[in-house]
Image (cartoon, rainbow, N blue to C red):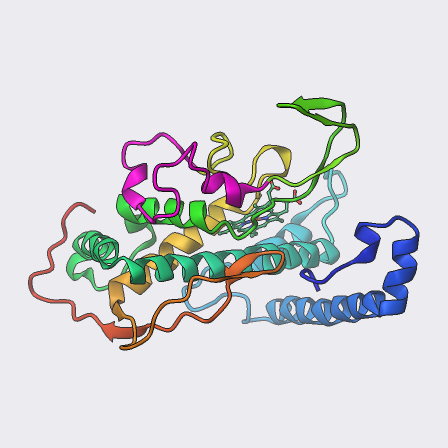
């Protein structure tokens, strides 16, 4: 639904009628009810006794939110309800899952095309984890090269290439262009990430370009804005980064990856609201044996 054309977004009043005729409104309503039923089920499962504490005896985000609903008092400034929990789950589903999955796929795609970078990342991760045989969450903070890989992947393949639309509050001038108040603005971070005036060899995947660079992803450096900037910056940035780092570190720690023989990697982007890979990435995983030589280095 998110990727489909919605006339009401572009044509006030008449767009609503168009969407009614095309069945867009009905499909939207049905999708909403289906998702609502899924979130209700998740909440019910968590409310059932025994279902809340999981394998590691830790609360998950739904447990925490349900606890907040239970513990709140009448004097609290914000009154949290189960509908709020559903809205938060919806945000995580809609904004957090595709974006992270798309980035992991592009990172693995770029690494498969650049075996030296793949090997550097694996050496770093394997020497960090050593014989422990398992990657712990705090190992990830030491993985400097992996972080460079993630930055470089998000430079070339930001999952939200145009950010969220903005509207100008006042008259602006950018170069020779007059931008009038109430103009809808799309910031093309995809193009900024590949701008040859900013980046050397912009089309090439070179994680090392971030080695001595101060550029980060937090919306302060306008050359690299995969999470946006300002008030509407991605609120899930820290969770997104943690997911990317952990997932990639695990994929690279436990397996070597080969492109199937005779197959070429296609880099075409599938253009919807997010910029995923058009065709599925096919790689062969080869289980890595944790050897005697693996020493714990710096973690
Ligand atoms: C690789 C991971 C992710 C990327 C690249 C990403 C990227 C973005 C971008 C570009 C925006 C628009 C920001 C702007 O226009 O300035 C955004 C908004 C948003 N993101 Fe993320 N995101 C990621 C993960 C997540 C996760 C894990 C969550 C939730 C747990 C999340 C929740 C949201 C929400 C709710 C918004 C809308 C904020 C608003 O309306 O103001 N994102 N994200």
Q: Quadrant of residue 85?
A: bottom right
Vertically, is 163 above or below 42?
above
Is residue 66 at all visible to an observer of this figure? no
Q: Which SS does the magenta portion mostly show?
A: loop
The residue lying toward the viewer, choosing from 172 and 129, is 172
Q: Position of residue 180 (x, y in %)?
A: 77, 28
Q: Residue at x 11, y 67 (%)?
A: 291
Q: Position of residue 252 (x, y in %)?
A: 28, 62
Q: Residue at x 33, y 31 (%)?
A: 213
From the viewer's perspective, tell me whether residue 51 is left or right of residue 135: right
Q: Position of residue 107 (x, y in %)?
A: 38, 57
From the viewer's perspective, tell me whether residue 144 is left or right of residue 86: left
Q: Residue at x 41, y 64 (%)?
A: 56
Is residue 207 at all visible to an observer of this figure? yes
Give the extent of the magenta segment.
188-216
Vertically, is 73 above or below 26?
above
Vertically, is 120 above or below 183?
below
Q: Quadrant of residue 135?
A: bottom left
From the viewer's perspective, tell me whether residue 184 is left or right of residue 193: right
Q: Residue furthest left?
A: 293
Vertically, is 108 above or below 174?
below
- Is residue 210 rendered magenta in the image? yes
For the N terminus, the quadrant is: bottom right
The residue lying toward the viewer, choosing from 286 and 61, is 286
- Is residue 203 rendered magenta in the image? yes
Q: Quadrant of residue 103?
A: bottom left
The residue lying toward the viewer, choosing from 88 and 77, is 88
| Tally of numbered discs | 0
């Amino acid at each position: 639904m998110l990727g489909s054309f919605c006339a009401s977004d572009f044509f006030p009043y008449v767009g609503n009628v168009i969407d009614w005729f095309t069945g867009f409104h009905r499909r939207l309503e049905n999708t909403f009810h289906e998702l609502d039923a899924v979130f209700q089920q998740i909440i019910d499962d968590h409310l059932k006794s025994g279902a809340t504490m999981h394998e590691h005896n830790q609360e998950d985000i739904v447990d925490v939110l349900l606890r907040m609903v239970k513990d709140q008092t009448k004097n609290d400034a914000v009154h949290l309800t189960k509908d709020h929990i559903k809205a938060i789950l919806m945000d995580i589903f809609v904004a957090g899952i595709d974006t992270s999955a798309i980035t992991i796929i592009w990172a693995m795609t770029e690494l498969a095309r650049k075996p030296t970078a793949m090997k550097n990342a694996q050496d770093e991760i394997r020497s960090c984890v050593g014989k422990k045989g398992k990657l712990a969450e705090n190992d990830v903070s030491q993985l400097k090269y992996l972080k460079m890989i993630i930055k470089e992947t998000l430079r070339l393949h930001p999952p939200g290439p145009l950010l969220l639309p903005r509207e100008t509050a006042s008259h602006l001038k950018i170069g020779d262009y007059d931008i009038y108040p109430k103009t809808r603005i799309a910031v093309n971070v995809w193009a900024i990430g590949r701008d040859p005036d900013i980046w050397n060899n912009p089309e090439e995947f070179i994680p090392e370009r971030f080695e001595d660079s101060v550029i980060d992803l937090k919306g302060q450096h306008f050359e690299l804005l995969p999470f946006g900037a300002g008030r509407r910056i991605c609120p899930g940035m820290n969770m997104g980064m943690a997911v990317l780092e952990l997932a990639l570190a695990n994929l690279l720690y436990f397996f070597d990856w080969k492109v199937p023989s005779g197959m070429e990697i296609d880099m075409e982007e599938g253009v919807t609201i997010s910029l995923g890979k058009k065709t599925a990435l096919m790689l062969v995983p080869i289980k890595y044996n944790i050897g005697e030589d693996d020493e714990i280095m710096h973690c």
